[in-house]
Amino acid sequence: MHDHDHSPTDHTEHSHASLGRRELLRGAVVLGIGAAGATIAAPAVATPLGADPAASPSLAPEPEAPADAPPGALAGVEVVTPTIASCATWGAAAARGTIEPVAANPNKILIHHTASANVTDYSQAAGYQIARDIQQWHFANGWVDTGQHLTLSRGGYVMEGRHGSLSRLQNGSGTVVGAHAPGQNSQAIGIENQGTYTSATPPAQLWSRLVELCAYICDQYGIAPTQIYGHRDYTATACPGDVLYSMLPQLRSEVAAALSGSTWSVIVDNTSAGFAAGGSWLTSAFSAERYGANYRYATPAEVSDLATFSATIPSNGSYRVEAWFPGIAGYNTSTPFIVYTGTGSSTIRVDQSTGGGAWLSLGTYAMTAGTRTVVAVSRWTQGTAYVVADAIRITRL
């Protein structure tokens, strides 16, 4: 087993002494140290919010991760195959040295953040550009190629990182030696998540795709969901940021659910009996990304005027909550979704200007049994761009 590529150009993974400050910070995109250097910070504690739509968003309360499920193929569950852009698709340059193959399957997943800006351009083009930028930054460090195996943009686009990673993942056999965590490069799949998550929460579309991607990797290689770790678990670094690191129990839980299937799920559409909204919430069928026949929209205002989705939670337990909406440029970039657990609530702000037409995770929650409002969409946000209420899905884990 090897800790890094044996080509001389990748030995800089272990020593940055010869690099200038600009190159060092660029290299930190994969190493995840950013401006924080090698300081290890304590994970942030997720505190549920009250029902005030104007309050800052928080992480969802974390239930204990369930026991590992067998891979989807063994459980009779079809795991979603995510769309992953190959190096050729996003325009990678050729590797500048030998990329060493690994015959054995990886035994874990390591989660990183790029420690770069939390950009609001969530387009595919922006995702491909960050992949190209990272490769060039790593070339500047003297590495043979992009260090991580896979890259995930803030818009939810997945790209192959190091050449050769994708074909081996798709075949479920072996991998290539990366350059993302010394000591783990030949046995861990490294996933870079675009952005800095020291105090910010990942966008919903990034999170939803990360769950899907990790479930696919676990299924292909037979990795247990409990084998998903943060970079800081193996290296003295702040990566993947306090907030994202504190969400890893939730990630393991949602990945386990994706692998095992779920025993109960309900969808509440804006046309369902469980939906309610006042006269300010108008109806539209404009976007083909809608769920069902139509959806509701409203202009932001500092008023208590919620569009609510009610359901009957069958038993106390852990539930994943997801939202569906059309993502249109010009819709609100910070729409407040409030999730009520029966003992408290959490507010999650969602960018509805992109990433629509799919189920996006609002988190996993410990909920109490009973019939009540489970999710509300608030008008209390900034700007004049419409907020949208379309459909929600609740799944028992």
Image: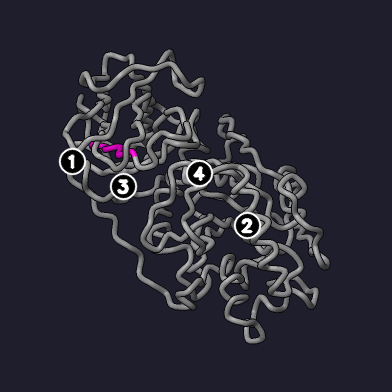
Front-lying residue, 12 or 52:
52
Task: Tell me the SS state at disc 2.
Answer: strand
Q: How far apart are marks 2 and 4 (CA)?
A: 14 Å
Disc 2 packing (10 Å; few <14; some 14–19; many ≥20): many
Q: Distance between the residues labelled 3 and 2?
A: 26 Å
Mark carried by residue 189: 2
Q: Are marks 1 and 2 in contact (CB under 8 Å)?
A: no
Position of residue 21 in the picture relative to residue 348 (left or right): right
Queried whether the magenta region covers residue 305, the answer comes back as no
Mark carried by residue 211: 4
Q: Is residue 117 visible?
A: yes
Q: Which of marks 1 and 3 is nearer the N terminus?
A: 1
Q: What stretch is highlighted in magenta?
A: 335-340
Task: Tell me the SS state at disc 3.
Answer: loop
Disc 4 packing (10 Å; few <14; some 14–19; many ≥20): many
Q: Do the residues labelled 1 and 4 touch (CB within 8 Å)?
A: no
Disc 3 packing (10 Å; few <14; some 14–19; many ≥20): many
Q: Label 3, on which residue?
A: 60
Q: Earlier in the sequence, mark 1 or mark 4?
A: 1
The image shows residue 2, relative to residue 243, as above or below, that is below
Q: How far apart are marks 1 and 3 (CA)?
A: 13 Å
